[in-house]
Image (cartoon, helix red, strand yellow):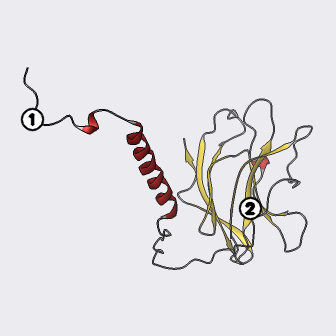
Amino acid sequence: MQQSAVPELAHTYTRPIHWMATATAVAGVVALSSLVQPGAATAAQPQGPRTHSAPAAAAAPGTTGVTFPIDCGPVRAVVAKKASGDLDGDGRPETVAVVHCDAAMGTPPDAVYVLTQAVGAAEPRVVATLVEAKDRYSVTDFAVRDGAVTATLLGYSSPDVPNCCPDLKDDVKWRWQNGAFVRSTDAGARGI
């Protein structure tokens, strides 16, 4: 058997000193990484027309505790959807709520209300009704964007159409103009 010309390499067998060196190196990397932090992230501001937004201190009115003008008999009113935004351009956000009765069966019709809360007022109040429950609409694709409320209303062409199967679809938008919410329809009521 021929002996190797190179003596045994020291690193082929682990010894406690090797483990100490590795642990010290790892601890150094961890300690150094906690001291070195990346710079603050910045985002480019979008160019184009500026929109008036609500001040940071102005919070949108909540829906908790609000008495909505919907007759639900012995059951309670339920807020199914809500969205907020500055609808009248005063710098304070309003909340728009889609409300229906908490029915055990079926699909109860929706109503849509606009809430506002005056500075210093304890509770928000309903200031406008955009859709009444008696009109038998279901509200879908609901949003508040760019100072307008948009929704798709599913309704019925006659009282003979069963509640399960709305046969009309209407894409609508409400915008605050001259002290009132004005409703516009994209393409008129369509059958579905």
Residue named by callout 2: 95
Q: For the residues marked 1 and 2, what is the alpha-carbon distance in whole angstroms?
A: 85 Å
Crowdedness near tag 2: few (<14), some (14–19) or many (≥20) residues, C-alpha within 10 Å: many
Q: Earlier in the sequence, mark 1 or mark 2?
A: 1
In the figure, is residue 31 to the left or right of 150?
left
Crowdedness near tag 1: few (<14), some (14–19) or many (≥20) residues, C-alpha within 10 Å: few
- Which residue is at the far top? 1
Q: Secondary structure at mark 1?
A: loop
Q: Nearer the viewer, residue 128 or 4?
A: 4
Asked if disc 1 and disc 2 are in contact, CB closer than 8 Å, the reply is no
Q: Amino acid at mark 1?
A: Ala
Quadrant position of residue 150: bottom right
Query: Which quarter shows the C terminus?
Result: top right
In x, y percent, where is residue 3? 10, 27
Q: Amino acid at mark 2?
A: Thr
In the figure, is residue 24 to the left or right of 190?
left
Q: Secondary structure at mark 2?
A: strand
State the count of labels. 2
In x, y percent, where is residue 46? 47, 74
Q: Residue at x 77, y 29 (%)?
A: 105
Depth check, mark 1 against mark 2: the one in front is: 1
In the figure, is residue 68 to the left or right of 114?
right
Q: Residue at x 46, y 55 (%)?
A: 28
In x, y percent, where is residue 119? 85, 74
Q: Residue at x 47, y 60 (%)?
A: 32
Quadrant position of residue 57: bottom right
Q: Which mark is residue 184?
A: none
Residue named by callout 1: 5
Q: Nearer the viewer, residue 83 or 19?
A: 19
Task: Say above or below: 121 vs 156.
Answer: below
